[in-house]
Structure formats: structure tokens, C-alpha cells
Amino acid sequence: MLHAMDIDVWLQRGAVAQPSSISDTLATGNSAVLDWPELQTSVAACTACELHRSRSQTVFGVGSRQADCLVIGEAPGAEEDRRGEPFVGPAGQLLNAMLAAMGLSRDDVYIANILKCRPPGNRDPEHHEVSECSGYLARQIALVEPRIILALGRIAAQNLLHTATPIGQMRGQQYTYGDTEIPVIVTYHPAYLLRSPGEKRKSWDDLQLAMTYLAEVKA
Ligand code: URA
């Protein structure tokens, strides 16, 4: 999944439909080298799927671009769409608490989503939307070069790992991202944990696993 060549093809395809200067650059074949500002501009101008019609704004990502831990959620909700930042609504409050329990703050990690635009009514992302958006996240991952990825919820985990395995079976397993050796730790989405607080214990087990990987990096 998300190999450099796929990113090239995807970005160049997107470039045809987007008459921005970055897109012109992409069309000339320099797509693999988008830096942060170019990537951010490209996301903000994206019209690759219909979600651009209903969004207030794109939600790019936030946090440290040198983070050891990259946190990946599903898609912006209403509050994120309004404020342009991931995980700032109720689920975000719980995510902050989860990070604090790991000894981390939002500034210590990088936070992004599978989709950069809010699906109307917070419905699940559609396959073609994930596919149109995947190059942006792939480039974010390549730029951050995290030591671990924490996948929040079924949508993030299944799309990052290209599997239909139920999340309950993915938790606690050893996965790596694409053809890299970056471990992917799967846990429940904070929005699910708000609805099912009894599952927090399991999620804490997952976070402790993530902390074990992070401790190895620092050792
Ligand atoms: N849920 C997500 O998956 N991402 C957000 O940014 C907010 C809520």
C-alpha cells in the first residue's frame, strides 16, 4: 500500500484537475518531493472528491512534524470542520486524556486523519474518498517519519493496513505500515470509548504497548 510510485501516480492524476501552481509542478513530474507547505496548500485546494462541496475547510493535521508517534483517526467531525484542526471535539478531549496517560501532549505527537474533509453527518468514509485522499496521508507519514503509528478505530486501522479484519482482532497484533518497519498499534477510537467506557481498559493495554515501542526508541 501507499508506495512511492502510487503516491506519484495519484498526485499527478490529482494535478490534472487542480489548476494551482503546485499542481502544475506535480504535472511536470516532481510530485514525490512535496514539502510541508506544498502539501498543505495542495490539501487546502483539493477537489478530488465530492466532500469538498460540503466542507467548511480541510483539516490537514497538527502537532510536531518530528514526532516519534503519529496518531491517525478517521475523518473530521463537525467541530474539526469548523476549526480546521483534528480531534478538537469531544473525542479529541478523550484523545488528549489518552495521550496524557501516556505522558504525552498533543504537541509531542502528530495527529492526522484518513480523510481531510468531513463526511456529511459523520457517515463512514467511502472507499473512493479514502483512495483519493490516501496520497496526502502517505506523504505526511513520509515527512514525519514516525517511530510508531497509533491507529484510532476501525476505519483508520483497516485502511492503513489494507485489511477487513475486525478491530477487536487487530488489537494487540504486530503490524507494520506498508513496506516500512514502522509499527502500527491499533486501538479503539475515542468516540467509541465515549460510548463504551467499559472498553477503556483494553485501550489502555494498547496504549501501554505503544509506550513500550516508544521507550525502545529512547533507550
Ligand atoms: N474523529 C476523528 O476520527 N478525527 C477527528 O479529527 C475528529 C473526530
Image (cartoon, rainbow, N blue to C red):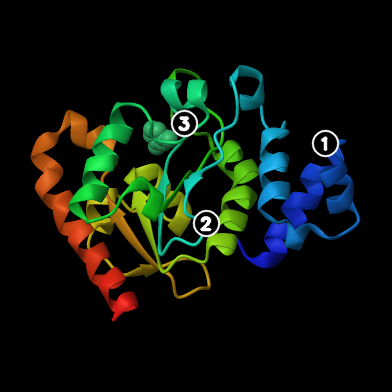
Left or right: where does residue 89 sit relative to residue 59?
left
Contact, CB < 8 Å: mark 3 with mark 2?
A: no
Q: Going 65% across and 42% down the picture, which residue do you hit? A: 132
Which residue is denoted by mark 2 in the rendering? 65
Q: Residue at point 15% right, 58% down?
A: 205
**Residue 155 falls in image quadrant:** top left
Q: Which residue is mark 3?
A: 76
**Please, what is the three-letter code of the amino acid marked with disc 3?**
Pro
Pointer 3 or 1: first along the chain: 1
Q: Which image quadrant for residue 215?
A: bottom left
Question: Disc 1 and disc 2: Cα gap in Å?
Answer: 26 Å
Callout 3 secondary element: loop
**Label 3 to label 1: alpha-carbon separation:** 23 Å
Residue 1 visible in the picture: no
**Disc 1 + disc 2, Cβ < 8 Å:** no
Q: Which residue is mark 1?
A: 18
Image quarter (top left, top right, bottom left or bottom right) of the C terminus: bottom left
Residue plotted at (64% across, 51% down): 135
What's the amino acid at mark 2?
Arg
Q: Earlier in the sequence, mark 1 or mark 2?
A: 1
Between disc 3 and disc 2, the foreground one is 2
The yes-or-no answer for disc 3 within 8 Å of ligand 1 is yes
Question: Which of the pair 33/5 is nearer the observer?
Answer: 33
Most extreme residue toward the bottom is 219
How many numbered discs, if any?
3
Q: Secondary structure at mark 2?
A: loop
Which residue occupies 10% across, 49% down?
201
Residues marked 3 and 1 touching at CB (< 8 Å): no
Residue 130 place in picture, x, y as percent: 56, 42
Locate residue 64, reporting x and y percent: 47, 54
Relative placement, left or right, of 137 versus 79 is right
